[in-house]
Image (cartoon, rainbow, N blue to C red):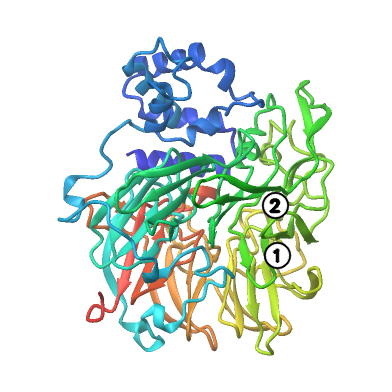
Amino acid sequence: MLATLCGFCSMIYSTFPRLLPFVAATAVFAAVIPTETVAQDAGDLFRNACAECHSGTQSGRTPNRFSLSQLTPRAIVAALGEGGVMSSEAGELSAAQRIMLGEYLTGRAYSEEVLPASAYCADAGPTRVNVNDVAWMGFGADLAGTGFQPAQRAGLSAEEIDDLELLWAFGFPDASQVRTKPTVVGDLAIVGDQFGTVFALHAATGCVQWTFEAEAGVRGGVLVGEDDDGRSIAYIVDARTTAYAVDTQSGDVLWQTRVGWHPESNNTGHAVLHENKLIVPISTMGEVVSAGDPRYECCTSSGAVAALDTSTGDLLWYHRVIPEYPEEAGKNAIGTQLWAPSGAPVWSSPTVDVARGVVYAGSGENLSRPANETSDAILAIDLDTGELDWIFQATEDDAFTMACSSSRNRQNCPSPPGPDLDFGMAPILVERPDGKEILVAGQKSGTVWALDPDNDGDVLWSTQIGRGSALGGIHWGMATDGHLVYAANADRPAEIVSVNPDMEWSPGLFALDLMDGGVVWSVPAPDDTCTDRPGCWQANSAAPTVIPGVVFAGGLDGHIRAHATDDGRVLWDFDTVRDFETVNGISARGGAIDGPGPVIANGLVFVNSGYASFGQMPGNVLLVFGVRGDAP
């Protein structure tokens, strides 16, 4: 029931006028609190004990109600309890009242147990991870963000694709979307969920070896490495930008650091691990959403990329995408103070260029005017210092918040509103067939850009493959095998306003020549898969993944397909929109496939299914495919 409610709420606030966060939250809260009396008591308790500092209008140093809704019930209860950061303010609250507030703010039941005992492996418990056994780690599998898995690590050939079958399914409790990529290391597949639980699963069977609970949802993947003492460490970043270093053998948290400087800072992309640095992308989702409230003082945050010392969690550098700090910028129509400049979130994973000593990151729109030159841009940031090397800005003067999607509460919509054309994907560093390295990035405008990393990001070529919109164009990513670059196009004609209206709608998968950007082939999204499926869209939005000879691409129609890299023909197709019997005893159903691409490692194909945001089909399942005779 809760999964349905969460999916419904996510669908509503993302699709319709992108409703105010407290409106969406109220719908969930009212549904999950057992009785009307208890719900009223919880609301009164929040208003009396918390609202003065944590109301929907707060824009100071404390998180507002939307941000609190991103936490787990256990995190809120811990913060209010003895030794917690809010213990002095909550001194008069009983244990029952703290739990009531945790449930009220998050819309989920407080529980000490995440899964039934039967979900755990017979020898469950923390285990040492051998980093030499990593078969997949990171959004794009490597520091360059290519999305390419070589044959040896893939353990799967093009000739075997037709023999793929479902080996097991894992259900995420209460979830309405699955958006983190598993890290595959040795016998484990480590994956987080939207509520902050990290599961270390036995890759062959899906049984749970151990779990870790972060304070907020985990939207990026888990990273693994070794510290100076030879301990194997899992590095996790949650949606509130708290980074954790966890000893995989003991389960102890070695350090914990909140990275984002702003109370509404968020993490929506995959962090990157390089030598002694944990590199964290920081978005501004809290303010994008909160701006829908006309009483909110919009906006004061900036996107960022930060580097932490992996041994201590200490901050090594912090690069604000907007270097200027906000100043008063007039008032909106109801008299609320406005601020500028702001925004330019870093939604996606950074890319590390080891040879040039640079981190590449894509930025999004400004949240208030005036817009600046670092929004909707590719940034090259010095790996050692965090200083900006160069900028390529693809779209100028783009300023947008969720208020712009509202028919009534538009007071915090920048005037005029911009088209919201982020770089939502991780840039890709790739060597062309002629030996030259180039940087390739796809934008929500529907444009694929090739930049010269040796000449301050000069444009080598650009190709328009879609009409583009706030939901893509190219939304989540691309992949490359060094010959072609494969781009998913998310054109959705019935839902969104395009930015290139003279083009035909062209949802589907495209393969472009790395030398000149020419379209080598394209495969349109099938037009007959969404009959009687509410929230089904015939488009490709999720990032693809490529192995030699095969590119895997998930669809918003819930299908995962394997295409031949030479001409795009479909080699294998599996419809995930169904109920699944899971290895962990949790009811699970597939839905839209969006966000990260599938993971292919050690002969297994890991596919996330379910993405309730933007009016799409909810789901809560991780599906694992293999050739049964060859499965580990």
Under mark 2, the amino acid is Gly
Residue 219 placement (x, y as % from top left): 48, 50
Identify the image quadrant of the C terminus: bottom left
Residue 116 placement (x, y as % from top left): 20, 45
Residue 518 placement (x, y as % from top left): 71, 83
Provide the secondary structure element on which disc 1 rests: loop
Q: Nearer the viewer, residue 416 or 106?
A: 106
Residue 31 in sight from this viewpoint: yes
**To which residue does mark 2 refer?**
364
Q: Residue furthest front?
A: 229
| Residue at left offset 80%, top offset 41% | 324
**To which residue does mark 1 refer?**
467
Q: Earlier in the sequence, mark 1 or mark 2?
A: 2
Please state if 513 lies on the left or on the right of 258 as rendered: right
Q: Which dot marks residue 23?
A: none
| Residue at left offset 52%, top offset 40% | 257
Question: On the image, which quarter does residue 381 sit in?
Answer: bottom right
| Residue at left offset 61%, top offset 35% | 264
Q: CA distance from mark 1 to mark 2?
A: 18 Å
Identify the image quadrant of the N terminus: top left
Q: Nearer the viewer, residue 616 or 363?
A: 363
